Image (cartoon, rainbow, N blue to C red):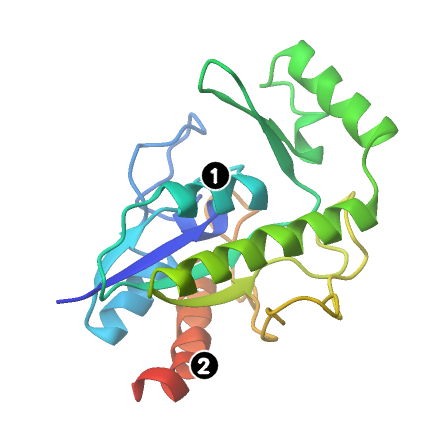
Amino acid sequence: MGRLVAFGCSNTYGEGLPDSWNTTWRWEGKTSKFAWPQVLADKMNLECVNMGEGGVSNKYIANLIAETEFQQDDIVVVLWTYFSRSCVFQDDGSVKRIMVQDIPNKNMPKQHRNWNKIYYKDFYTDQEAIKDGYFRANFAKLYLDSIGIKNHHYTCSESNTQPTGPSSIKPAPKWSCIDFPDIRFKYLDKALDGNHPGVKSHEQLAIDIYEDLGTNYDV
């Protein structure tokens, strides 16, 4: 059996779904069987390897793809996250995330919240986010192509999805070899956290991606 290897943020991990949710708002250390990667893998009769992680950026996702060991018959599907996010890789191996939601998040250390506030106030621009996001996605596609791994790219980012972020990620830059299909969560329901997409929403996204991939794999 081949593998479906999925990359993305909490919308790929399956945050807030029944088997990944608890009242302490902490990860349980496993990805959800209700998340779109598992649903899609089941439809394609593939093993699911869900590499999604909560709160990550496209910069982080691209780096994770570059550091992952693939099998030659893998099919990689990436659900790129919100373009307004970023991160800084630290010398000690840790990663400092940059996301606008962390500014008011009292669960985060004050120093981290202030650091994010300064970044979005003094350094962030929509154009930087758009260009950098497409650079990351294009790198990942070209890298996977170069090692012979089938890969497909979608995004959960769209207009007005973030308090701070690009007003639109379309059209793609002229130099981009990726133009994301118009496939997004339809938000038919919400997860148990009241924020992320719910079980039905993940199921529908998996169906939409499955139908889109059908032209490539005769599924």
Between label 2 and label 1, give the one nearer the viewer. Answer: 2
Quadrant location, the C terminus: bottom left
Residue indicated by mark 1: 54
The percent coordinates of residue 166 (x first, y second) are: 78, 53
Residue 102 figure quarter? top right
Query: In the structure shown, which secondary structural element does the residue marked by tag 2 occupy?
Result: helix
Left or right: 207 as drawn, with respect to 159? left
Camera-nearest residue between 65 and 53? 65
Q: Is the residue 106 above or below the residue 151 in the image?
A: above
Q: Is the residue 67 above or below the residue 123 in the image?
A: below
Residue positioned most to the right: 122
Q: Is the residue 159 above or below the residue 25 in the image?
A: below
The percent coordinates of residue 111 (x first, y second) are: 68, 10
Residue indicated by mark 2: 212
**Residue type, label 1:** Gly
The residue depicted at 36 percent of the width and 62 percent of the height is 76
Mark 2 nearby-residue class (10 Å; few <14, some 14–19, many ≥20): some
The residue depicted at 68 percent of the width and 11 percent of the height is 110
Q: Is the residue 188 above or below the residue 212 in the image?
A: above
Left or right: 76 as drawn, with respect to 174? left
Quadrant location, the N terminus: bottom left
Residue 164 can be seen, yes or no: yes
